[in-house]
């Protein structure tokens, strides 16, 4: 047992909503968590035809349906709620208004953690929406943040499990009639964090090493979002912070939305500054195409994140 960890931290049960890029946190009040909504991606210009797949009504409907299935009445959006990084053009403001209006009318309590795309978003949200800063929040043993910047000290020091987005994780598989032309599929990433060394436990400063024993990275909620092919590509520059500072501190596995275990991810970070990690997968488990479908991402017996939903 790692005496440096606070094993007394009690965390709620976390599990994916079957077939959806939504996390269910079974806390004192059940909570749905989704990341990277990117409102406006379906409507890039005022006169362009809107793609229904990523439209505000469709995205809101998915969350309302998940709430109906799970009994959750609260939703936490983990950043990048809107697509333009700066500004909120009128046609995208209409998407934001419609999306939040539908959630609130459906009886959901909504909270937002600001992401790197959310400059100017807070003043456009309904008064009923609770807004948290980009450094995230700690609640009932879980630390939530978007993933583009350091979370708060409370998240780093107190959370038993970390939950983030930002990475848009995906896997490139063989193209098929059912799969997009690129062959990319969104996926979950689950990382079991390695114990801190004595020197790390003593380290002080603005950004102490995370004490969490586990981390979950959500797939992008908007189906129109581009994704990182973690088995084929290096992460884009804006995503490397999350990999280097968090995911590389543990042992990661990837899972499709249907629960298929895609195998281990290796974040082999060279010591040379500015160089990139090896994003290959561990083929010892059969590789992404050879893995047999498994249950949804599950925790080790001592953890509680992403336990399978036996009803699926």
Image (cartoon, grey):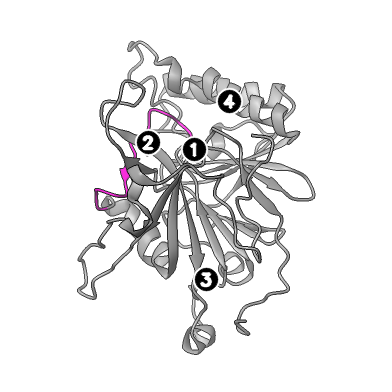
* Residue 291 in the image, given as x and y percentages of width and height: 40, 46
Residue 257 is marked as: 1
Residue at x-position 43% and y-position 70%: 249
Q: Which residue is mark 2?
A: 185
Q: Which residues are magenta?
A: 221-234
What distance separates the C-alpha of mark 1 from that of mark 3?
Answer: 27 Å
Q: Is residue 140 left or right of residue 237?
A: right
Residue 145 in view in this figure? no
Among numbered discs 4 and 1, the one appearing first in the sequence: 4
Location of the C terminus by quadrant is top right
Secondary structure of the residue carrying numbered label 1:
loop
Q: Which residue is mark 3?
A: 210
Vertical order, 268 against 238 (above or below): below
* Residue 228 in the image, given as x and y percentages of width and height: 32, 44
- Look at the numbered discs 4 and 1 and tell me whether their residues touch, using CB distance below 8 Å: no
| Residue 14 counted in the magenta span | no
- Look at the numbered discs 1 and 2 and tell me whether their residues touch, using CB distance below 8 Å: yes
What distance separates the C-alpha of mark 3 from that of mark 4?
Answer: 32 Å
Secondary structure of the residue carrying numbered label 3:
loop
Crowd around label 2: few <14 · some 14–19 · many ≥20 (10 Å): many
Displayed quadrant of residue 12: bottom right
What distance separates the C-alpha of mark 4 from that of mark 1?
Answer: 14 Å
Among numbered discs 1 and 2, the one appearing first in the sequence: 2
Secondary structure of the residue carrying numbered label 2:
strand
Displayed quadrant of residue 284: bottom left
Among numbered discs 3 and 2, the one appearing first in the sequence: 2
What distance separates the C-alpha of mark 1 from that of mark 2?
Answer: 9 Å
What distance separates the C-alpha of mark 2 from that of mark 4?
Answer: 18 Å
Among numbered discs 3 and 4, the one appearing first in the sequence: 4
């Amino acid at each position: 047992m790692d005496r440096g960890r606070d094993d007394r931290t009690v965390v709620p049960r976390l599990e994916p909503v079957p077939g959806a890029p939504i996390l269910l946190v079974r806390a004192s009040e059940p909570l749905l968590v989704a990341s990277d909504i990117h409102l406006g991606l379906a409507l890039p210009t005022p006169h362009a035809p809107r793609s229904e797949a990523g439209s505000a009504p469709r995205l809101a409907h998915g969350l309302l349906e998940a709430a109906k299935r799970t009994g959750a009445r609260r939703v936490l959006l983990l950043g990048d709620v809107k697509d333009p990084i700066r500004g909120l053009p009128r046609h995208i403001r209409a998407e934001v208004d419609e999306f939040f209006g539908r959630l609130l009318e459906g009886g959901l309590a909504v909270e937002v953690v600001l992401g790197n795309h959310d400059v100017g978003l807070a003043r456009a949200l309904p008064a009923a929406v609770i807004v948290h800063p980009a450094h995230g929040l700690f609640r009932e043993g879980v630390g939530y943040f978007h993933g583009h910047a350091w979370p708060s000290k409370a998240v780093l020091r107190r959370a038993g499990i970390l939950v983030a987005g930002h990475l848009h994780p995906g896997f490139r598989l063989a193209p098929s009639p059912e799969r997009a032309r690129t062959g990319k599929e969104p996926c979950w990433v689950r990382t079991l964090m390695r114990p801190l060394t004595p020197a790390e436990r003593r380290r002080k400063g603005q950004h102490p090493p995370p004490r969490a024993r586990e981390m979950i990275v959500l797939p992008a909620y908007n189906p129109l979002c581009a994704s990182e092919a973690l088995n084929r590509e290096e992460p884009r520059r804006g995503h490397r912070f999350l990999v280097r500072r968090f995911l590389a501190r543990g042992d990661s596995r990837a899972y499709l939305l249907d629960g298929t275990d895609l195998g281990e991810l290796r974040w082999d970070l060279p010591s040379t500054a500015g160089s990139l990690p090896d994003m290959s997968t561990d083929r010892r488990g059969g590789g992404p195409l050879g893995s047999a479908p498994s249950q949804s991402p599950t925790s080790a017996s001592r953890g509680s994140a992403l336990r399978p939903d036996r009803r699926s």
